[in-house]
Every structure is written in C-alpha cells, then in structure tokens.
C-alpha cells in the first residue's frame, strides 16, 4: 500500500515537471524553426499543457483500466471549474466583466454537449474519437481566425515558456525530460492508482474522477493560485476553458484510437451531468459578467468537496 502511494506521488511530481519541460522545449523549438507565435500558442502550448492528462489516459487504456482514462477527463473538468476557479477566487476576486471569453465558453459548452452525446452512444471507439478530433480541428481553426483578426494576437513574450535566446542544448534537454518523464510518470500514477482502487474496493472510474483528476489538474491549479496571489486571478478562467475543451476533444479523441473506452452506467447517470451542471454554472459569471467573489469561491470548493465525498462514500 505504501508503495502504491509512493508511485502515485512520484508519478504526479514527474507529470508536473515533465509537462512543464515539454512545453518549454516545444515552444522554443517551434520558435527557432520559424513557426509564428500565434500558431505555437494555439497548438504547441495547448497540447503541451494537456500532455499529462493525455499520457495518463493512454497509459490507463494500455494497462487495461480504461475507467481511469474516462474518469480522469470528466473529473478534471469538474475539478477545473470548482477548484481551479474556486480557490483563486477565495484569494482574489475574479473580475468576469473584463475577461472577454464568451466565445471560448460557448465552445466549451458545445464540446461538453458533444462529448456527453457520444458517451451515450458508447463504448467510445475510433469513430467517436474521430468525431471529437474533427471538433477539435474546427475549434482550432476558429481560434486561429479569431486571433488573426485581433490586434493583440500572440507575441513571443506572451507564450508560456518562451525564451528566444535559449541555446539548443537547453531546448533538447527540456524535450528529453518531457518525453521521458511523462510516460514514466503516467505509468507510475496509473499503476499506483489502480492498485489503490483494488485495495480500498473503489472502482477505477471513481479513482480517475477523484485522485487522478485532481492530480493531473495540479499544474492549472498552481498557475491559477500563483496568479491570484499576484492579484491576477482573472487568468484562471482562460486556463479552465482551454483545458476543459482540450480534455474532452483532444484527450479522449486520441485515447479512443488506442482502445475502446467503456462508459460506466454510473457515469451516464450522474458524473456526466455533474460536469454539464458545473459548466452551466458559469453562465451568469461569463455571459452575464457577474464577478466570482470570495463567497462564490467558497461555495465552489464546498460543492466539490461534497461531490468527492459522495463518490467515495457510495
């Protein structure tokens, strides 16, 4: 049991560090190769920050525990809304009126509806995955055209991990750490989590919805908390919307080609609807532009705590 806990802890640390290294190496390699910062921001950074979730989901399917893969994505989206927005809001109010993320939010709602619809046509196989990836391609194309028409389209200094003066050895080093560390971390986390599920008699899906989901959301949570401490908590909303869309369309879109992903009846009955409700809960804050205050943040965290308790207690 102690070894399983150690595997999970080491796996999470490796995923966070290797994911950050991969983003930094990929961004600087792309810029060195002359790829425009706008394209890098919409593709390399977006995919790179979702790499931990992707590797965990693929590893779970290959290891014969697909419940962890699906639970990871659904649970991460729920945790992103209630924790990655709730905790920073407790530290510093998120001023929704200044965000301008309505377009991305509508995309997130559409991706959520598409994903839930496909789950009811499951198990998720290659054709479900193909539909999700087509949706991702359409989203990227829409973002690209919107960003091109915007005066402040991504510049090098706006990109996460960008260092125009980074030497080649550093770029290769970051890429190596990311490409080696991510699969090792994913394997450790999945194996440790699966073993813990067996020991406690908890389903692999519940472990994916809770432990694994929160673990793979740690990079987004850390980024948002640091921003909140700097009185810049508004950036949390963009992180959540982007991460949730990529989780649904990109991660399951890729994982579905690795192997079939059964959709448990419990997820069809409750967890998918919790994810949908959490997404719709943001409507007044994004479309009606109410601020996410400290009181709202406390409510968000309390809702997530109650949801997690209900999963483990059942």
Image (tube, grey):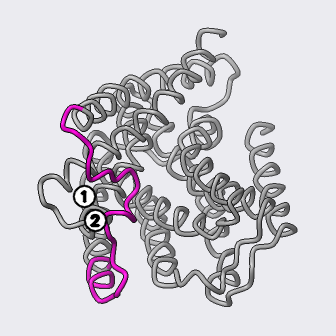
90 lies left or right of 151 = right
Q: Is residue 121 above or below residue 262?
A: below
Residue 127 circle label: 1
Which residue is under mark 2? 131
**Residue 155 among magenta residues:** yes
* Contact? badges 1 and 2 (CB < 8 Å): yes
* On-image quarter of the C terminus: top right
Q: Mark 2: which secondary structure?
A: helix
Front residue of 273/57: it is 57
Residue at x 27%, y 40% (from the top left corner) = 258
Q: Is residue 314 above or below residue 13?
A: below
Q: Mark 1: which secondary structure?
A: helix
Residue 101 place in picture, x, y as percent: 52, 80
Residues at marks 1 and 2, CA–CA distance in whole angstroms: 6 Å
The image quarter in which residue 141 lies: bottom left
Residue 270 place in picture, x, y as percent: 66, 57
The image quarter in which residue 58 lies: top left
Q: How crowded is mark 1: few (under 14 residues within 10 Å), some or many (20 or more)?
A: few
Residue at x 81%, y 72% (from the top left corner) = 293
71 lies left or right of 88 = left
Residue 287 place in picture, x, y as percent: 62, 88
Residue 63 circle label: none
Residue at x 22%, y 39% (from the top left corner) = 167
Residue 174 place in picture, x, y as percent: 31, 34
């Amino acid at each position: 049991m102690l070894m399983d806990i150690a595997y999970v802890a080491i796996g999470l640390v490796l995923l966070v560090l290797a994911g950050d290294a991969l983003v930094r190496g990929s961004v600087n390699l792309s810029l060195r190769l002359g790829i425009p910062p706008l394209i890098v921001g919409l593709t390399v950074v977006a995919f790179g920050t979702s790499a931990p979730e992707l590797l965990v989901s693929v590893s779970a399917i290959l290891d014969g525990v697909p419940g962890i893969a699906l639970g990871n994505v659904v649970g991460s989206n729920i945790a992103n809304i209630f924790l990655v927005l709730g905790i920073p809001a407790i530290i510093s109010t998120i001023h929704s009126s200044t965000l301008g993320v309505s377009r991305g939010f509508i995309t997130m709602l559409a991706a959520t509806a598409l994903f839930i619809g496909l789950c009811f046509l499951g198990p998720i196989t290659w054709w479900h995955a193909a539909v999700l990836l087509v949706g991702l391609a359409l989203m990227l194309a829409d973002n690209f055209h919107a960003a091109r028409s915007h005066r402040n389209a991504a510049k090098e200094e706006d990109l996460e991990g960008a260092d125009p003066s980074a030497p080649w050895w550093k770029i290769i080093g970051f890429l190596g750490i990311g490409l080696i560390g991510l699969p090792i971390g994913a394997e450790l986390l999945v194996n440790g989590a699966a073993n813990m599920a067996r020991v406690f008699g908890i389903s692999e899906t519940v472990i994916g919805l809770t432990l694994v989901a929160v673990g793979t959301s740690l990079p987004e949570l850390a980024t948002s908390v640091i921003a909140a401490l700097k009185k810049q908590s508004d950036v949390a909303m963009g992180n959540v919307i982007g991460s949730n869309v990529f989780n649904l369309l990109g991660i399951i879109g890729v994982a579905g080609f690795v192997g079939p992903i059964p959709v448990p009846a419990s997820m069809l009955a409750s967890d998918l609807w919790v994810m949908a409700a959490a997404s719709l809960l943001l409507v007044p804050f994004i479309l009606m532009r109410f601020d996410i205050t400290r009181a709202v943040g406390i409510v968000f965290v309390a809702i997530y705590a109650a949801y997690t308790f209900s999963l483990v207690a059942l």
